[in-house]
Image: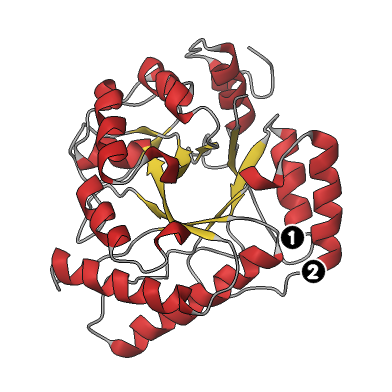
């Protein structure tokens, strides 16, 4: 079964209930959310009654809780240790985020590995390894941290499969660390998505495909290798509809949630219902977004 969804909202009042209802409105059977704004530290206390209500609505809609993805905020940077206070802040915030994910009954937390900010890639990798070991040392949950493939802009760490493998292989609780693929990021970092089987072969050899738990299915505004990280709507960018569709339906990723993080239309209209419908129809429609809500 195709597991397809998008980024959805989560607020302090309705919390997970809001996320579920938005996902249902898009015709999705999975979704991803932040537990608060990705750019700041403000977080509301998880309401158990809202979790219970959301679980009931998910059950009625046929959404499996095991497929839901949470994304960690951008403010966490485990790769830079120039300022020890900020480094420790990232560690402590990630520890708390794991507790929140567990309280919500979710199993996966996507994390940007971080930027080394001049310390160098090897030092950045070591900093991430040390941080993950500290974060996971006394954490008793079953939540997996999914390191996301990055575009390579600035001093980002995790722009290659080798870098992600090196990080993961030095984590003591290695089974608690998995991978989230992002098609835009892979393209922008230099991978040829038209040769996706070769990418999967490399992942299998160096990390193991069983450790890939999520795919962000974003097109890109950039040519391959641009290292800019600018998402485009599904099929409307340089990667293209046919290439992305093959990834979505790839048999080696069949049971893995596919999540859209594509831009709003005119900055106000979420495109996810239309994109999900187009993906299910397996037919590109260049006029799709003029329909706004109509099936293909």
Residue occupying the point 48% across, 81% down: 92
Depth order, front residue of 255/191: 255
Mark 2, residue position:
47
Sequence-first tag of 2 and 1? 1
In this rendering, does residue 171 appear at all? Answer: yes
Q: What element carries label 1?
A: loop
Q: Quadrant of the C terminus?
A: top right
- Would residue 142 be found to the left or right of residue 160 on screen? right
Give the vertical position of 154 relative to 286 (above or below).
Answer: below
Residue at x 59%, y 62% (from the top left corner) = 142
Residue at x 24% of width, y 50% of height: 159
Q: Mark 2 against mark 1, which lies toward the viewer? A: 2
Quadrant holding the N terminus? top right
Pinpoint residue 62: horizontal percent, then vertical percent.
78, 34
Name the colour scheme: secondary structure
Rendering coords of residue 4 (x, y %): 59, 31
Q: Where is residue 279 in the image (x, y as percent from the top left)?
A: 54, 20
Judged from this view, the residue extending furthest toward the bottom is: 85
Q: Nearer the viewer, residue 60 or 189?
A: 60
Circle 2 crowding by C-alpha within 10 Å: few under 14, some 14–19, many from 20: some
Left or right of 90 on screen, residue 79: left
Task: Residue 198: give its label.
Answer: none
Along the horizontal axis of the image, is 274 left or right of 220?
A: right
Circle 1 sits on which residue? 15
Marks 2 and 1, Cα distance to the nearest angstrom?
8 Å
Label 2 with label 1: CB-CB less than 8 Å: yes
Label 1 crowd bin: few (<14), some (14–19), many (20+), radius 10 Å = many
Looking at the image, is 32 positioned above or below residue 51?
A: above
Label 2's element? Answer: loop
Up the image or down, 175 lies above or below 188; here it is below
What percent of the width, then of the height, locates residue 192? 22, 28
**Quadrant of residue 30 in the image?**
top right
């Amino acid at each position: 079964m195709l597991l397809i969804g998008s980024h959805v909202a989560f607020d302090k009042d309705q919390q997970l209930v809001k996320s579920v209802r938005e996902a249902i409105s898009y015709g999705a059977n999975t979704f991803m959310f932040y537990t608060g704004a990705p750019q700041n530290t403000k977080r509301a206390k998880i309401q158990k009654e809202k979790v219970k209500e959301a679980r009931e609505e998910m059950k009625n809609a046929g959404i499996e809780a095991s497929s839901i993805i949470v994304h960690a905020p951008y403010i966490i940077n485990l790769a830079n240790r120039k300022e020890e206070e900020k480094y420790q802040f990232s560690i402590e915030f990630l520890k708390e985020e794991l507790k929140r994910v567990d309280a919500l009954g979710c199993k996966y937390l996507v994390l940007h590995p971080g930027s080394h900010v001049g310390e160098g890639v090897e030092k950045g990798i070591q900093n991430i390894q040390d941080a993950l070991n500290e974060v996971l040392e006394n954490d008793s949950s079953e939540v997996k941290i999914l390191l996301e493939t990055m575009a390579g802009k600035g001093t980002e760490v995790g722009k290659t499969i080798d870098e992600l493998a090196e990080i993961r292989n030095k984590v003591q609780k290695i089974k608690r660390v998995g991978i989230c693929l992002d098609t835009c990021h892979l393209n922008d970092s230099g991978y040829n998505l038209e040769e996706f089987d070769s990418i999967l072969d490399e992942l299998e050899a160096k990390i193991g495909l069983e450790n890939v738990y999520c795919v962000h299915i974003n097109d890109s505004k950039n040519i391959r290798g641009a290292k800019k990280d600018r998402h485009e709507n599904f099929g409307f960018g340089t990667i293209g509809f046919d290439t992305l569709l093959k990834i979505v339906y790839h048999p080696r990723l069949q049971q893995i949630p596919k999540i859209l993080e594509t831009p709003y239309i005119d900055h106000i209209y979420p495109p996810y219902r239309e994109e999900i419908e187009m993906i299910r129809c397996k037919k590109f429609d260049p006029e799709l977004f003029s329909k706004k809500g109509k099936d293909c």
